[in-house]
Amino acid sequence: NAGVMQNPRHLVRRRGQEARLRCSPMKGHSHVYWYRQLPEEGLKFMVYLQKENIIDESGMPKERFSAEFPKEGPSILRIQQVVRGDSAAYFCASSPRRLAETQETQYFGPGTRLLVL
Amino acid sequence: AQSVAQPEDQVNVAEGNPLTVKCTYSVSGNPYLFWYVQYPNRGLQFLLKYITGDNLVKGSYGFEAEFNKSQTSFHLKKPSALVSDSALYFCAVRDMRYGGSQGNLIFGKGTKLSVKP
């Protein structure tokens, strides 16, 4: 049973370009969370999605960032017009169901390390 | 405001000695607490969690943690440290907005554990 998959593992972009990060949850998981880890910092919640729905995007910057989790395919975190401050590790986590209904745990992917030149 | 504090940026321990990594939290209601470990350039691996029940929780790789409600703490412990335990350790608490139904986590900044032979 494969774990949470993220690709690419490393991504280099120049300022102004777009970055597209992909997350495939564990098999049977329909809930996805995105977190950002800035250098020397802990992880900060960005967005919580269920298939075809954004449940909570309170941690997302208001501009340039968007996320989706279509019915088919991976979840995508898109950053438009990247700036140097976007350089960070972006982690995706998944769970099988709404966590309030269970004592389940989130399982994390290996992360995408974005470097903006 | 909800938060997690890990007061030590780094903990140094000799192999074979007991280790403690400290964590305190601030959250409304009953907390859901977690410990994760991150190895260099890797994702987060789940170690253990406290949801309810016994205050002493046992997890992976010989780690355990003790929930102390009066001190709002959830310190990670291991009786005998190994060099291979050297990594970055994160304490997290479930975000209790909306009664915790979203499931996203609030992380501490992390503690770097260094175990010397």
Image: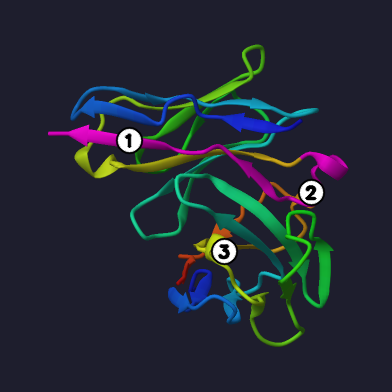
Q: Is residue A50 left or right of residue B106?
A: right
Which residue range is magenta in the image? B96-117
Quickly name the residue at label 1.
B113
**Residue B63 in the image: x percent, y percent?**
40, 34
Mark 2–mark 1 Cα distance, whole angstroms, equals 32 Å
Q: Could you tell me if the residues under marks 3 and 2 are in contact, i.e. CB atoms within 8 Å?
A: no
Residue B106 highlighted magenta (yes or no): yes
Discs 3/2, front: 3
N-terminal of the pair, mark 3 or mark 2, is 3
Kind of element beneath mark 2 = helix
**Residue A48 in the image: x percent, y percent?**
74, 61
The quadrant in which residue A18 appears is: bottom right
Residue at the spot 74% in from the left edge and 52% down from the top edge: A99
What amino acid type should be assigned to the residue bearing mark 2?
Ala
Residue at the spot 47% in from the left edge and 54% down from the top edge: B44
Residue at the spot 26% in from the left edge and 35% down from the top edge: B114
**Residue B97 in the image: x percent, y percent?**
83, 41
Residue extending furthest toward the right: B98
**Residue A30 in the image: x percent, y percent?**
72, 71
Q: Could you tell me if the residues under marks 1 and 3 are in contact, i.e. CB atoms within 8 Å?
A: no
Q: Nearer the viewer, residue B116 or B58?
A: B116
Kind of element beneath mark 3 = helix
Mark 1–mark 3 Cα distance, whole angstroms, equals 27 Å
In which quadrant will I find the C terminus of chain A?
bottom left
Q: Residues within 10 Å of mark 1 (few under 14, many from 20)?
A: many
Kind of element beneath mark 1 = strand
Quickly name the residue at label 3.
A86
